[in-house]
Image: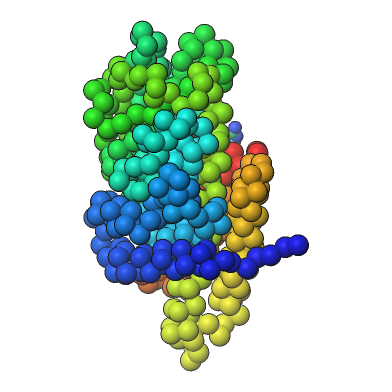
Amino acid sequence: MIDLSLTDEQQLAAKLARDFARREVAPTIQEQDAVGEFDRSLLAKMAGLGLLGVSLPTRWDGAGGDYITLGLVCEELEHVDTSLRVILSVHVGLNSLTLLSWGTDEQKRRWLVPQASGEKVATFGLTEPSAGSDALGIRSIARRDGADYLLSGEKMWISLADVADHFLVIAWTDLEKKEARDHTGMSAFLLERGMKGLTTATIHGKLGIRAGNTGSISFDDVRVPEANRLGSEGEGFKIAMFAIDQGRYTVAAGATGLIRACLDASVEYATTRTTFGRPIAAHQLIKEMIAEMAGDYEACRLLWFKAGWLKNEGRRSTRETSLAKMQACACSEKAASNAVQVHGAYGFSSEYSVERFFRNAKGAQIYEGSREIHKLL
Ligand SMILES: Cc1cc2nc3c(=O)[nH]c(=O)nc-3n(C[C@H](O)[C@H](O)[C@H](O)COP(=O)(O)OP(=O)(O)OC[C@H]3O[C@@H](n4cnc5c(N)ncnc54)[C@H](O)[C@@H]3O)c2cc1C
């Protein structure tokens, strides 16, 4: 039996996220985007509402929602701005859900509990200056030093890098396997801000997601105790792929919310702007763009629903998640481009939000597996 109805809890969580984004972010997002600065106060507000632990079990201080709830919240957040959804993608998707699956109880008590309550903010670092899609090309190394590791290297293009308290990072622990490009030579580590040798910075001059924080993390012989290793030595690549499978799901749902934002903005504008004596909404070619947005929204929603359902069932969903991400990101880029078109010259200006949607949509064709990598998958 296929049942696509939402439970009361799921609807409530979506409403909570929608009300929060509209009340706390929508009124100022254009200015925030223009100055290009992350508003740190949002994290405490999201934590207070339980959004930072939305799909983490109550046992570990989360709000106890399922994957569909997580997707709905991501849709609502990105309906207002991509930077909001990115917070959930890294904090919940890439980091916390991975810690939940791969961590020991002791690690969960130490790192997951403060993350689920939102007391600490977490991110995930795989990408480096020299390697993104080609994860085996990373250069970070964790050398054994007694009971500890010494971590050196640099991560780049990391969401919330300059804001996060906790970092889940991947590095080579076996140098021979690094040379042979054998992924079983990689391991995963949990790092904390304040560790000696760990520094972060913000990347400026981004095309989009300007209200969000994207940055770099440098490791200069950071001493990492063995207790901070997630999984066994050699499981880093597997852990990274698991993490990305959760992160991609949030991107798919969020990009679907962006399609809806483009649709809503286009309908509103098209019914008020007139040309040749009629609202532009009455012209067939404008209707076509709007109809495509409406169809794409529904189709992309079904794709992430399917991936979320599989995840709730504890079944493998790598292919479905990749398809949902690929499709939603392509459709949101098209929707944003057409939303600018519907707005004419006004769409070309920051006076209307569709210009921001257009810039933000591009990012998702690059991160969490680029458009090309998903096609190959
Ligand atoms: C806003 C933003 C936030 C990000 N956040 C994070 C984060 O939190 N954590 C993290 O670890 N990373 C993050 N990233 C990094 C992101 O995951 C990488 O940028 C992405 O994996 C692509 O890697 P690259 O930029 O090095 O491009 P490259 O891998 O160098 O690729 C360049 C181009 O070549 C194409 N290409 C590569 N290989 C192939 C192939 N085999 N066949 C065909 N085409 C190919 C790519 O699709 C792309 O078009 C973020 C990036 C951005 C822009």
What residue lies at 30% left-to-right and 65% top-to-bottom? Answer: 24
* Occupied quadrant, residue 120: top left
The residue under the point 53% across, 68% down is 8
**Which residue does the image show at 65% across and 39% down from the upper left?**
377
Find the residue positioned furthest to the front. 59
- Determine if residue 171 is in view: yes
Q: Quadrant of the N terminus?
A: bottom right
Which is more toward the observer, 256 or 40? Answer: 40
x, y percent for residue 52: 39, 51
Marks counted in the figure total 0
Residue placed most toward the observer, 159 or 65:
65
**In this picture, residue 14 sits left or right of residue 196:** right
- Toward the viewer: 129 or 303? 303
Taking the image as drawn, is residue 211 in sight? Answer: no
- Image spot of residue 339 (x, y percent): 48, 68
Q: Is residue 182 left or right of residue 196?
A: right
In this view, which residue lies farthest toward the right?
Answer: 1
Query: Residue 28 placed where, x, y %?
Result: 27, 65
Colouring method of the image: rainbow
Q: Residue at x 58, y 66 (%)?
A: 6
Give residue 93's position: percent from left, percent from top. 48, 45
The vertical placement of 284 against 314, above or below, is below
Q: With respect to residue 234, does 107 lie above or below?
A: below
Most distant residue in the bottom direction: 277
Q: Which of the two residues, 281 or 21, is positioned nearer the viewer here?
A: 21
